[in-house]
Image: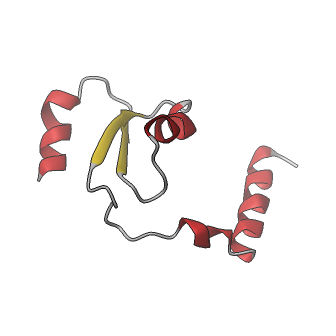
């Protein structure tokens, strides 16, 4: 079984067993803030854990461009 099939099978079981219910939250972050971060794969679990965050606490915005912060990114988040 290839990687994609393994992922799809896991997702199928995840949905069938309704495991998503413990992650339900509304669209508004509980702590009322957004965190701008790089999209480095190592940060998936590290960043929330290092800040004591759980699902629904913040909007976590990931971006791959290192030069975006001073211009477009912050302005579009503030709008």
Residue extending farthest top: 67
Tell me the residue at 16%/39% (across/down). 74
Q: Nearer the viewer, residue 3 or 35?
A: 35
Position of 8 with respect to 22 (left or right) is: right
Is residue 79 shown above or below 3? below
Tell me the residue at 78%/45% (across/down). 3
Residue 30, x across and y down, in percent: 34, 61
Residue 78, x across and y down, in percent: 13, 49
Residue extending farthest front: 52
Position of 3 with respect to 1 (left or right) is: left
Residue 45, x across and y down, in percent: 56, 39
Position of 2 with respect to 53 (left or right) is: right
Tell me the residue at 26%/50% (across/down). 33
Is residue 37 shown above or below 24? above
Tell me the residue at 88%/49% (across/down). 1
Is residue 69 shown above or below 78? above
Q: How many marks?
A: 0
Residue 51, x across and y down, in percent: 43, 38
Q: Residue 9 falls in which quadrant of the image?
A: bottom right
> What colour scheme has been applied to the protein in the rendered image?
secondary structure
């Amino acid at each position: 079984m290839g990687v994609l099939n393994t992922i799809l099978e896991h997702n199928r079981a995840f949905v069938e067993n309704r495991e998503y219910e413990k992650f339900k939250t509304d669209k508004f972050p509980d702590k009322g803030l957004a965190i701008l971060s790089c999209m480095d794969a190592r940060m998936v679990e590290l960043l929330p854990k290092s800040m004591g965050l759980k699902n629904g606490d913040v909007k976590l915005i990931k971006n791959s461009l290192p030069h975006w912060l001073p211009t477009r990114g912050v302005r579009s988040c503030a709008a």
